[in-house]
Amino acid sequence: MNLHEYQAKETLAKFGVQIQRGKVAATADEAVEAAKSLTEETGTSWHVIKAQVHAGGRGKGGGVKLAKSLEEVKEKSGDILGMQLVTPQTKAEGGMDIEEVAEKHPDKIFKEVIDPAFGLQGFQARRVAFNLGLSGKAFKEMVKFVSALYKAYVSIDASLFEINPVLKTSDDKIMAVDAKVTLDGNALFRHPDLAALRDEREEDPTEVEAGKAGLNFVKLDGNVGCMVNGAGLAMATMDMIKLSGGSPANFLDVGGTADAERVEKAFRIILKDEG
């Protein structure tokens, strides 16, 4: 389950992760009131307005705008709220993602392998700060930042944290400017407060329907429907389809205890995909 950026930041802040102050607005007028409040708190009249959607590339798609006055806050928030946001996931001139960096500049990638039996060790957090070339107060703040992130990650049963960018302020504080958080759906029963944050509007409607029926369903781009009982057999079936020159249209595991009703629902879900 994915969280919106503002939800992710609020969650991280509970564990001591430094974040930027922000407020959520559903209308342009609410955005103006939020900007006024933030100006009183921070003393700045500049504000960044960000669309809250589960997608990358918001800035290039027009979903992130800088406003230097209340008039611009109202205008630009209105533009974002009224637009259909198309976020470019690729670009013609190419670019460099983390896989390319790892291949072409492996010296730029720093990794820390954490043993779950022992957790993040102090020397590992310090090594991250050292590898980033930090010193003094900024070094100590980064150690706190990394430690707080790990505590949050484990405590909420997350499967992914992506903090990009991380900011070092002029007074050497370390904070998360953006945050993408994915939670382990199988562990949500332990976190009803986080489960309540789910925004089904941002998810594939078919996957939502399947989840409510107790089915494990993932939509793919192929044209061969798959319904299998057991995740291992489902993966093997998909491999066989690919080896035979086909392409799976979905991953659907009805589970080992499926009854006739669940199988019927599974068939109906698969047949909705006319591709």
Image: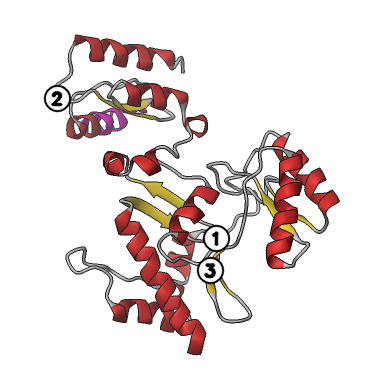
2 or 3: mark nearer the eye: 3
Q: Position of residue 28 (x, y in %)?
A: 75, 40
Question: Which residue extends farthest bottom?
Answer: 136
The circle drawn on residue 96 is 1
Whether 143 is among the magenta residues is no
Q: Is residue 159 left or right of residue 20?
A: left
Snapshot quadrant of residue 193: top left
The amino acid type of the residue labelled 3 equals Met
Residue density around tag 3, few if under 14, some if 14–19, many if 20 or more, within 10 Å: some
| Residue 79 as seen in the image, left or right of residue 64 | right
At 42% across and 14% down in the image, what residue appears?
272
* Residue at numbered disc 2: 256
* Span colored in magenta: 236-247
Question: Nearest the camera: 106 or 155?
Answer: 155
Image coordinates for residue 17, horizontal then vertical, percent: 46, 65
Answer with left or right where residue 200 lies relative to residue 262. Answer: right
| Badge 1 amino acid | Met
At which x and y percent is residue 79? 77, 40
Q: Quadrant of the N terminus?
A: top left
Q: On the image, numbered disc 3 is attached to which residue?
A: 175
Local crowd size for mark 1, using a 10 Å CA cut-off: few (<14), some (14–19), many (≥20): few
Category of crowding for the residue at label 2, using alpha-carbon neighbours closer than 10 angstroms: few (below 14), some (14–19), many (at least 20): few
Foreground residue among 69 and 205: 69
Mark 3 vs 1, N-terminal side: 1
Q: Can residue 133 be seen by looking at this rendering?
A: no
Cα–Cα span, label 2 and label 3: 45 Å
